[in-house]
């Protein structure tokens, strides 16, 4: 009887747990706290945080429970991450949720979304300089786009062993947009610039809204064929939305499909961060480089907006350049908040959505370009 009791105790999580498991469980609790108590991207951080808890419960090897054990429930869920299934489905929902009219009304603002992608390529070079392999450096750099699905998609094909730390870094920085971006925005702009009022955008016709997803898809994917799965689903979702006749499909894409996939993706990514796999020097380096990528991307958008003002008769508020990172719509909201602290009657949200949306497209194109160079 005593032997049975000892054997039972030796197989419990209390006996099998290492310090890595405890550290990661604490990290998971912090993410859940940030999601619930602080409201930082709760739809992302709560599933990821709980997934971290699930992935760090110590289990007996070859028991068919761990995420890296073939045939386990978590392993089947992780299949959608490793084979790039979940990110395009999320892009489908984003497309069905997105109104491109703000971007179409003033196409020049798309340049701000492109400028923010400097963070991706600058961090790619920085990671190479620090000794990361090219495929790993590309996956780390994409964090600068502040686009979790794109980061996961690219990492799955270039550096699958880094999916856990890269996904956690990307989603963490997406959630911390309201904390990270405002100091950079204020540092790089004067009060006079932050008070700039922008003229009301023109009205975009229904025909333009219908044509854009088709033309945009063809143009972007001819430039970067590697972005086909992401941008194909993004523009298809938007076409469903704008066509009206397929409203049932659009409604499913922006509600049940994207919600279900977000849960599966969050749990799977979180569970992949087992302590003995996740807590490495590479993971620490990824978090540091990810922070610098996000900061550079934000600064690049703001600085490029100031550069554009040198040539524009009707000035743009450089704050909206910070929305060039593709954390939709969080970074656009941050622009609105920072702008209204200077002038409560100044409404920048809709203007900021233009670079915000173009940033989503830009980060996907950047991922496609990196894949085309390094995926072979």
Image: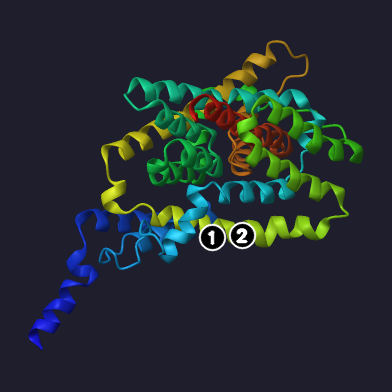
Question: Dot 2, crowdedness within 10 Å: few (<14), some or many (≥20)?
Answer: some
- In screen coordinates, is 335 left or right of 29? right
Q: Residue at x 59, y 32 (%)?
A: 363
- In screen coordinates, is 338 left or right of 207? left
Q: How is the image coloured?
A: rainbow
Residue 239, placed above or below residue 365: below
Q: Secondary structure at mark 2?
A: helix
- In screen coordinates, is 242 left or right of 72? right
Labels 2 & 1 near each other (Cβ < 8 A): yes
Residue tagged 2: 259
Question: Residue 67: where, in percent of width, then height?
Answer: 38, 59
Question: Residue 114: where, in percent of width, then height?
Answer: 63, 25
Quadrant hosting residue 352: top right
Q: Residue furthest top?
A: 311
Question: Residue 307: where, in percent of width, then height?
Answer: 63, 14
Q: Residue at x 59, y 61 (%)?
A: 260
In the rendered structure, find residue 263 and report the number of the disc placed on it. 1
């Amino acid at each position: 009887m005593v032997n049975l009791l000892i054997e039972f105790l030796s197989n419990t999580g209390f006996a099998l747990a290492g310090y890595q498991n405890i550290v990661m469980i604490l990290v998971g609790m912090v993410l859940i706290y940030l999601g619930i108590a602080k409201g930082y991207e709760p739809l992302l951080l709560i599933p990821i945080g709980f997934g971290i808890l699930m992935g760090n419960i110590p289990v007996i090897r070859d028991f068919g429970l761990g995420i890296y054990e073939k045939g386990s429930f978590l392993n089947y869920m992780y299949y959608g991450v490793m084979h790039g299934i979940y990110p395009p489905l999320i892009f489908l929902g984003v497309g069905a949720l997105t109104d491109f009219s703000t971007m179409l009304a003033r196409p020049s603002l798309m340049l701000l979304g492109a400028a923010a992608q400097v963070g991706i390529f600058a961090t790619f070079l920085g990671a190479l300089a620090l000794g990361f392999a090219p495929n790993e450096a590309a996956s780390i750099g994409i964090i600068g786009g502040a686009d979790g699905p794109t980061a996961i998609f690219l990492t799955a094909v270039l550096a699958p062993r880094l999916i856990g730390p890269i996904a956690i870094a990307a989603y963490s920085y997406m959630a911390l947009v309201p904390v990270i971006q405002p100091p950079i925005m204020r540092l790089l702009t004067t009060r006079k610039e932050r008070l700039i009022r922008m003229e009301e955008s023109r009205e975009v016709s229904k025909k333009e809204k219908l044509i854009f997803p088709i033309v945009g898809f063809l143009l972007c994917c001819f430039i970067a064929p590697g972005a086909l799965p992401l941008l194909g689903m993004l523009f298809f979702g938007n076409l469903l939305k704008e066509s009206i006749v397929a409203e049932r499909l659009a409604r499913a894409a922006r509600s049940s499909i994207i919600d279900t996939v977000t849960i599966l993706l969050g749990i799977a990514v979180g569970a992949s961060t087992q302590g003995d796999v996740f807590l490495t020097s590479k993971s620490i380096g990824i978090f540091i480089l990810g922070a610098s990528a996000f900061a550079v991307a934000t600064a690049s958008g703001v600085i490029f907006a100031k550069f554009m003002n040198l040539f524009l008769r009707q000035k743009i508020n450089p704050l909206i350049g910070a929305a060039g990172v593709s954390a939709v719509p969080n970074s656009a909201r941050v622009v609105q908040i920072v702008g209204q602290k200077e002038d409560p009657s100044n409404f920048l949200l809709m203007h900021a959505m233009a670079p915000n949306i173009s940033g989503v497209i830009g980060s996907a194109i950047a991922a496609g370009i990196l894949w085309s160079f390094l995926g072979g």
